[in-house]
Amino acid sequence: MNLEEYKGVFIYAQQVDNELSGISFELLGKAKDLAADLNTNVTAVLIGSDVKNLCDALAEYGADRVIVVDDPELKVYRTEPYTHALASVINEFKPEIMLVGATAIGRDLGPRVSARVATGLTADCTKLEIGDFPLNPGPNQKHNQLLMTRPAFGGNTIATIACPDNRPQMATVRPGVMQRITPVKGAKAEIVEFNPGFTPNKNYVEILDVVKSVTDTVDIMDAKILVSGGRGVGSPENFKILEDLAKAIGGEVSCSRAVVDNGWMPKDLQVGQTGKTVRPQIYFAIGISGAIQHVAGMEESDVIIAINKDETAPIFEVADYGLVGDLNKIVPKLTEAIKEY
Ligand code: FAD
């Protein structure tokens, strides 16, 4: 493999029902940083059916070029045709770096594509940067490598992984971790249409029906204020006091894994390493001890307010404001005070 042939930072622009997923903008934000370090440009790979209308948004969020694979066969995400499409783009355009969101779709697509193009993949990255590998100087150290960082061993250690001998360097990236740029209104990208060729009815999985979950709550990853409860809340009924606080302050309720494991709250409200990564303006951690796996999902919040009866709880190490005491007394008083304010 001639590594020199591989150029540019590519992202997979995930769309569902002709709407770009938030991760696509986050990947573009990160790709711009990496491309600046490598003195190269950013390409978004857009795959679907009748999706060309999405190119402008990708340009406004940082894509210099959009490669569009548009085919009726790609109307709904299915593993086989999407793998064929993305792997074909990689073989044709030879990116140095290929980033995919660690969403349900990306976790399915990324590993398949990496196997198809015979390169490695680092899954579920929380940090990406350009640097030297191995990290310590030595005769075989290579420069300008993609250093891909992710928690390992249940979050007890952080692994930095590189792919020095193969291209592209591929990673899936956790949603909610990378920051999108402020969009540049009217920005334009070069549009390249690419047709890898599809054989209709080639034993692809057939989607018979798509049933969408209906909810009237905001996804916790989009919430500006989160009122998060842990095992210390004591019971599912007692989450009412957190819901009252969330309502008073205009936020949403989320929780720790202990709460989900107890069956008190649904899994899609879980924050942390095996839940969602959130970055709200205000994060209340109420009756949450602050285990490393929880903190991994909320430490980037702008302001963290912890309420815990144990003054030695690790959550106070990451909190901007801490209240030591019984949440059953503190939270209702706080709610009343906010209502009066
Ligand atoms: P606890 O650790 O039991 O803490 C309860 C806290 O409430 C205590 O600090 C206590 O002092 C306080 N408290 C009790 N009563 C009151 C009261 N009346 N007033 C005020 N404070 C009170 N966890 C996650 O959250 N998210 C994850 O994604 C996640 N992923 C994991 C992945 C792996 C591989 C592993 C091994 C673990 C993971 N965990 C995760 C679990 C994590 O290690 C902790 O067990 C969990 O976060 C603890 O939840 P908690 O803080 O609610 O409960």
Image (cartoon, rainbow, N blue to C red):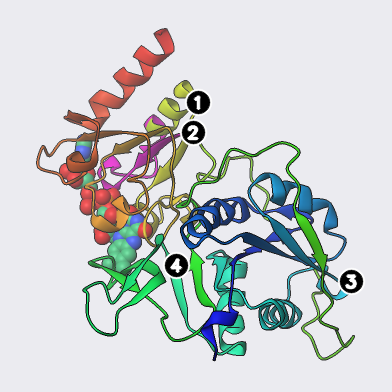
Q: Is residue 235 magenta?
A: yes
Q: Earlier in the sequence, mark 1 or mark 4?
A: 4
> Which amino acid lies under the numbered mark 1 shown in the image of this protein?
Gly
Q: Is residue 170 magenta?
A: no
> Which amino acid lies under the numbered mark 2 shown in the image of this protein?
Lys
Query: How far is the residue under mark 2 from the one under mark 1?
Result: 9 Å
* Residue 156 drawn above or below residue 224: below
Q: Find disc 3 in the rendering and name its residue.
A: 72
> Which amino acid lies under the numbered mark 4 shown in the image of this protein?
Asp
Name the side, left or right, on which 65 lies relative to 166.
Answer: right
Between label 3 and label 2, give the one nearer the viewer. 3
Query: What are the residue bounds of the magenta stretch?
Result: 225-241
Residue 7: image x %, image y %? 59, 72
| Placement of the C terminus among the 4 image quadrants | top left
Between label 3 and label 1, give the one nearer the viewer. 3
Between label 1 and label 4, give the one nearer the viewer. 4
The verdict on label 4 being within 8 Å of ligand 1 is: no
Q: Within 10 Å of the Cα at label 3, are there few (<14), some (14-19), or many (20+) other Cα atoms?
A: few
Query: How far is the residue under mark 1 from the one under mark 4?
Result: 31 Å
* Secondary structure at numbered mark 3: helix
In front: 41, or 158?
A: 41
Q: Which mark is residue 124?
A: 4
